[in-house]
Image (cartoon, helix red, strand yellow):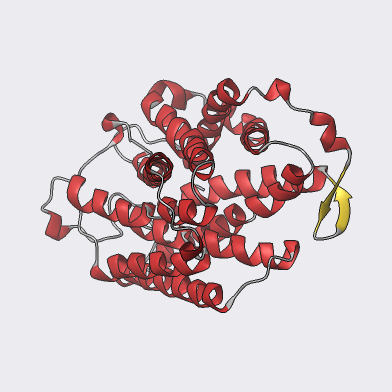
Amino acid sequence: MHSSSDPSAMSLDPRPAADLPLTEHHRSPAPGGRAAKVGLVLALVSAVAFGGSGTAAKPLIEAGLSPTHTVWLRVAGAALVLLPIAWKHRDAVRRRPGLLLGFGLLAVAGVQACYFAAISRIPVGVALLIEYLGPPLLIAYVRLVQRRPVSRRATAGAGVAVAGLACVVEVWHGLSFDALGVTFALGAACCQVGYFVLADAGRQGDRPVDPLAVSAYGLLIGAVLLTVFTHPWTADWSLLTRSVTMNGHQLPALLPALWMVLVATVLAYLTGVVSVQHLSPPVAGVVANLEAVVATVLAWVLLGEHLGPAQLAGGALVLAGAFAAQSAASAKS
């Protein structure tokens, strides 16, 4: 689920905006459309991995682990797994401290904190829809702040994807307005923008940072920040030694916990950050909308939460929007 960027990390191309294609901006070298294809595969893997986080977390929450402690377990566990990568790239702390701090603060801790604050006041579906306004906000940021062109196809794809998300989360079931809850959800959307902006900024300038280092240090910093606010020492961690229930079946609690850490966090962040280097941030952001569709489908298959016709139609719209945005990238590769 996957934020304000470090100004020193941004490197704007001096050429006029009209000369800059959607998918350029100091991309990793790759012949022709190969970069876009690699980026699309990585972005899809990231969306699928992120989409499984809720399905893995729900049995733990139902067994008695609080949502905030579940988030801490997810982020802290992933940070521990990525410690060797952080140690290998320890020079990144000296070279781009602002970038790493921003990613941890916004792309990791900020998204989680704002989202859980939002769902404590407004329905989950509404919070999800507002959070996934991130791609349109990202397009606006790239166009108005960075003054880089964004193709009409990518913009249209973002709009179609958001309309599809409204159907996937069935937003009409929870249209009550809570100003503070909506503000928190918008905060999550802005932090999601930062995820893509900072992932893209890491490869720019004369001090580029390996995307694996961005993920590793972002999760480490996010884990520290979440520790301050969630007080994990108050949780009953013996729950992880027992069994939990998933769709009527008993399984060891460690299984969904490990899935949540290794797949829904480690794999999701690593592939997501790298994908931005092969796609433009706006396109990667639109493809990331598939996370909500994956989450809904997995909840249907693994948790028995059935999908209605509107959700199926919404999923098709999200897929269409993502395809339109990605094809815009491929056309300009």
Residue at x 75% of width, y 46% of height: 62
Instruction: Tell me where residue 86 appears, x and y as whole percent.
Output: 57, 29
Q: Which residue appears farthest toward the left when viewing the image?
A: 16
**From where the camera sits, is residue 232 visible?**
yes
Q: Is residue 120 above or below residue 307?
A: above
Count of picture labels: 0
Residue at x 27% of width, y 29% of height: 8
Instruction: Tell me where residue 138 appears, x and y as whole percent.
Output: 32, 51
Residue 122 shown left or right of residue 16 in the figure: right
Instruction: Tell me where residue 117 appears, x and y as whole percent.
Output: 50, 38
**From where the camera sits, is residue 329 visible?**
no
Question: In terms of depth relative to the viewer, which is nearer, 314 or 85?
Answer: 314
Residue 205 shown left or right of residue 112 in the figure: left
Q: Is residue 96 above or below residue 247?
A: above
- Image quadrant of residue 321? bottom left
Question: In terms of depth relative to the viewer, which is nearer, 115 or 279?
Answer: 115
Instruction: Tell me where residue 314 appears, x and y as whole percent.
Output: 48, 73
Residue at x 43% of width, y 75% of height: 320
- Image quadrant of residue 258? top right
Residue 227 shown left or right of residue 111 in the figure: right
Question: In terms of depth relative to the viewer, which is nearer, 120 or 271?
Answer: 120
Q: Is residue 76 above or below residue 194?
A: above
Residue 131 shown left or right of residue 124 in the figure: left
Question: In terms of depth relative to the viewer, which is nearer, 166 or 37?
Answer: 166
Residue at x 60% of width, y 64% of height: 296
Q: Which residue appears farthest toward the front when viewing the image?
A: 176
Q: Is residue 289 above or below residue 320?
A: above
Q: Quadrant of the C terminus?
A: bottom left
